[in-house]
Image (spheres, rainbow, N blue to C red):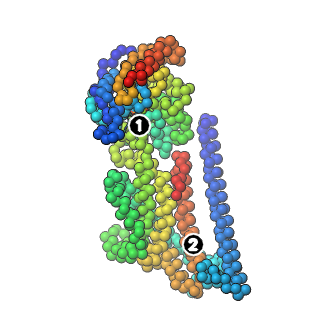
Amino acid sequence: MTEPDRCAVAISNVSKVFNQGKPNEVHAIEDISLSIGEGTFVSLIGPSGCGKSTLLRLIAALTHPTRGDVGVNDKSADQARLDRDYGMAFQTSGLFKWRSVAENVELPLQLMGWSKTDRKARAAEMLDLVKLDEFGDHYPHELSGGMRQRVAIARALSFRPSLLLMDEPFGALDEMTREHMQTELLDIWNKTGKTIVFVTHSIPEAVFLSQRVIVMSPRPGRIASDIRIDLGERSFETREASAFFEKVTEVREALRFEESQP
Amino acid sequence: MTARDEMAREIRRHERTEATRRTLRRIGVFVVFLVILALAYTGYKAFGQSLDDAQTDWPMIGRVLPRTDDLTMPPVSDIISEFTQPPQRNSDKPLAAFIAEAALFTMREAVLGFAFGVIFGLGIAVVLLRSKWIEQGVTPYLVASQTVPLVAIAPIVIIWGSTSLDWLPFEWTNWMSVSLIAAYLTFFPVAMNGIRGLRSADPAAMELMRSYAATRRQTLVKLQLPASVPYLFAAFKIAATAAIVGAIVGEISGGVRGGLGRLILDFASRYTTGPSRLYATVIGAALLGLIAIGLVTAAEYLVLSKRKEEPLAL
Ligand SMILES: Nc1ncnc2c1ncn2[C@@H]1O[C@H](COP(=O)(O)OP(=O)(O)OP(=O)(O)O)[C@@H](O)[C@H]1O
Ligand SMILES: [Mg+2]
């Protein structure tokens, strides 16, 4: 894979302080700079509370930096949000239980004023992509956790944003389903060529999925290491290759080194 | 059709028969309790009567507990047979027909009042949603509004309705004013539960809407209103009975004829010549309330079962 030339996400000297000046002040993120090339799959990993979700929400312009700048696709993060440049998926699928699976996928399209026929066609296409084409008329409560998560991904992709922000989307799934979903996500990434920023707690997951793993230090969150992963085309064998284990070890040690720092 | 669909269909069918059985059982239990109530009433009456016959003047009855003579407590059989008897000398229309006609009249007022109240209550809830500041400022006034007695408002509304609304494209009649009086009672639970329901939307879902750059109105219509539906139905159950009470009281204090309120007033003023007529009419009014609650509960079931949600407790 060639090094991309355009920046999908440009974070420069960003700090985030919650409840500034109050007794419950929290320095969540301290002076982070990071640029993510277009089409890259990047994972954020780090101990709980180190600011991974906060960083993702800063990119999404759902919260704003105390200091520094966040740019998405060469504009401000806020403008990118208004332009619907990114899709989001969280740990919980966040499907609307009063909408059928297809209607859930159609939600962003509806908000953007698409016609009914276009919406239906796109939703069918997206459900096909996540292999849920038979379940369009079902309601969320009739699906398993993994299926719901796939619907959430289909919803995030439905309006073809160039950037996909995912916060522990597979966190609540069992190991088998999780590996299956990882393969499917890579499949989607290969087909669509999106930029993906992926938050996870799982080292093997980060290594298996990403081209870059960003290891963050405990609070206040900083970037501890930026590890490149070159494992080529992923397959079932990748998980058992020694190169894979070497990278897993490298990330683990970077994490441990950070935790042991004062 | 896949085996999965087949199974889902089977489960849905099962759930439907379950729901029907639950409804039938509820009605059965209700009837059993009705019989128990009638038996208790009759038993108490017989007990009091036997004390009378034995000339023992047991001090509780007639002083603390109600007297058991036929004027205070007409026999159950009298009340039941009263339904088939004509209440007026010059016509042979049975009382049941009078009650039914009056109940329909009152129901019409109550339904319109319910609709006014729901629209008004939801409108208030949406305005209160704008800010905590508005909510804190306005809520005390809403609460205070409910302590103003209806009998004080009724004549004002009736007079206002008959004198000030002549600009409307249709004729504003007194029963519509009674609907407004009923709406005065119904908007309150809808507004209070409505604001709670609108705020009950999942914060993650709210954030999702923000990530789509959804407008305030889109968020309201696509997320907050649907999320408030279980809360609204809980409010509708209170509002449905409140609408009927409001309509009856509105009729009585506004002097509007044609409904249950007027009928109750008439029979109450002629109580000594036929106490069981009043009893029968009150039973009719109670039945109307049950029908109203039943309709709301059925609608609630239809809406919520689709999304697999339990009704909120009242
Ligand atoms: N809205 C908020 N108000 C106040 N503090 C917050 C807020 N959001 C996050 N924080 C604080 O910022 C820090 C980082 O939180 P964040 O959710 O980004 O961590 P995280 O790395 O995603 O953790 P986890 O792995 O457990 O999800 C935490 O200490 C948290 O308490
Ligand atoms: Mg998090």
Numbered badge on residue B284: 2
Is residue B54 found left or right of A170 in the rendered image? right
**Residue in the image at 51% along x and 60% along y:** B237
Is residue A7 found left or right of B274 in the rendered image? left
- Report the Cα–Cα distance between label 2 and label 1: 54 Å
User: Which quarter of the rendering shows the N terminus of chain A?
Assistant: top left
**Residue in the image at 49% along x and 56% along y:** B233
- Looking at the picture, how far across and down is residue B294, in whole percent? 56, 61
Q: Amino acid at mark 2?
A: Gly
> Quadrant holding ligand 2?
top left
- Residue at mark 2: chain: B
Q: Say which of A109 and B207 sits in front.
A: B207
Asked if marks 2 and 1 fall on the same chain, the answer is no
Is residue A162 something one can see in this rendering? no
- Looking at the picture, how far across and down is residue A253, in whole percent? 44, 18
Within-10-Å neighbours for mark 1: few <14, some 14–19, many 20+: few
Ligand 1 near label 2 (Cβ, under 8 Å)?
no
Which residue has dot 1 on it? A118
For label 1, the SS is: helix
Q: Is residue A143 above or below residue A233?
A: below
Q: Is residue A52 above or below residue A226?
A: below
Within-10-Å neighbours for mark 2: few <14, some 14–19, many 20+: some
Q: Is residue A185 above or below residue B214?
A: above
* Snapshot quadrant of residue A66: top left
Q: Amino acid at mark 1?
A: Asp
